[in-house]
Amino acid sequence: MMKKILPFLLVLVMVQMAFAQKGKKQMNVIIVSIDGLRWKEIFQGAEKQLMANKKYISQDSSDVFKKYWSEDQLERRSKLMPFVWGNLAKAGQLYGNRELGNNVNVKNTYWFSYPGRSENLTGYPDPKVNSNDYPDNPNKNILEFIDQQKGYKGKVVAFASWDAVAGSSTGTETV
């Protein structure tokens, strides 16, 4: 069961947002990586079987159904994740809708946080990155690469809620 769920734990949502600034167009890349979120919630919305299961719902399920359920999948996913579908999807790109064959899978054999994050940001699995206690990653990631390019030095910033990704050369902040 876990092997079926774990590939979806690392959801990579890349959003390119363009906006006008002093007459010229500026492009930003925002990468959001979330542990524990299933692809189905993003692309299909709330799951009826889970919403009706008392094991997962501590409140009146009729209130939950009123708030999050619709027979229409597009409406259902928007009800569950209004910011994702009202803002991010309109301004950028979401990857990982398995119903459309848009799979986002890791290749590493560990299927947990640090090896997955490393693979997502470097573009390849490293068997030496095999624990959540791993020290600073020796592999250059895409943010470090961009930071070294002409015109981008000092313009790459990463914010993280997990201290394992803090302290890199890209000016990472743990929030």
Image (cartoon, grey):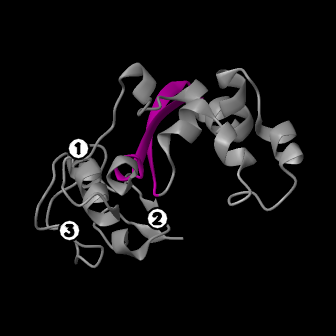
Q: Amino acid at mark 3?
A: Asn
Q: Residues within 10 Å of mark 3 (few under 14, many from 20)?
A: some
User: Disc count in the image?
Assistant: 3
Confirm or deny contact between disc 2 and disc 1 (CB under 8 A).
Answer: no
Residue drawn 43% across the image and 46% down it = 11
Residue 150 is labelled as: 1
- Of residues 30 and 103, the one nearer the viewer is 103
98 in magenta: no
Q: Is residue 165 left or right of residue 16?
A: left
Q: Amino acid at mark 2?
A: Ala
Residue drawn 37% across the image and 66% down it = 171
Q: Secondary structure at mark 1?
A: loop
Judge whether 40 appears above or below 7 on screen: above
Name the front one of labels 3 and 1.
3
Predominant secondary structure, magenta span: strand
- Counting from the top left corner in percent of width and height, residue 65 is at 82, 40
Residue 135 is labelled as: none
Name the front one of labels 2 and 1.
2
- For the magenta stretch, what is the residue range? 6-35
User: Looking at the image, is mark 3 or mark 1 earlier in the sequence?
Assistant: 3
Location of mark 3 (residue): 137
User: Looking at the image, is mark 2 or mark 1 earlier in the sequence?
Assistant: 1
